[in-house]
Image (cartoon, helix red, strand yellow):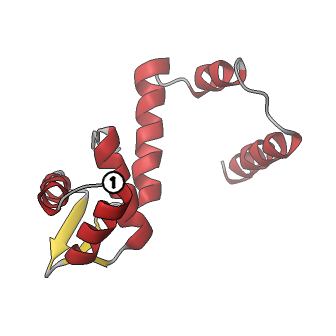
Amino acid sequence: MLDIELGTVQERFADIVWENEPIGSGDLVRLCEKELNWKKPTTYTVLRKLCEKGLLKNEGGVVTSLISKEDFYSAKSEQIIEDSYKGSLPSFIAAFMSRKTLSAEEADEIQKMIDAFRREG
């Protein structure tokens, strides 16, 4: 499981990189100025920190991710379930459904995932 803790601002920055990669660092500075109202030093500071964490790399002035957005958010979801529900997916789903109703389409999609798991299991 990935163990990369990101604050809200760092996560938003990573999302910008994922949505635009590969992206030149100069283009990233301009995009962060537009999207986040950041100055150049702020962009480079956050970029450096995420490179040090092993999430991104800045090679030859081109910024790319070392971990895909899907892998990052999967690991984050697993960590939430582990930390908050003692690793119990049914407990997480019960808590989630106590506050939100599933649509018929969502229920069908979840059932298809369960059916596929059982076939492959």
Give coordinates of residue 27: x percent, y percent. 28, 76
SS at mark 1? Answer: helix
Residue 79 position by quadrant = top left
Give coordinates of residue 48: x percent, y percent. 13, 58
Residue 3 position by quadrant = top left
Residue 22 seen by the camera = yes
Residue at image point 71% right, 17% down: 98
Residue at image point 47% right, 56% down: 70
| Mark 1 surroundings within 10 Å by alpha-carbon count, few (fewer than 14), some (14 through 19), many (20 or more) | some
Residue at image point 84% right, 38% down: 103
Q: Decide which of 21, 85 is in the foreground and name it.
A: 21
Residue 64 seen by the camera = no
**What residue sits right under mark 1 in the picture?**
36
Give coordinates of residue 35: x percent, y percent. 38, 59
Kind of residue sitting beneath label 1: Leu
Quarter the N terminus occupies = top left
Above or below 36: residue 24:
below
Q: Decide which of 19, 28 is in the foreground and name it.
A: 28
Residue furthest bottom as drawn: 60
Residue at image point 84% right, 46% down: 105
Is residue 84 shown left or right of residue 22? right
Give coordinates of residue 37: x percent, y percent. 30, 55
Above or below 22: residue 15:
above
Above or below 40: residue 53:
above
Is residue 54 shown left or right of residue 14? left
Q: How many discs mark residues in the rendered view? A: 1
Residue furthest right as drawn: 104
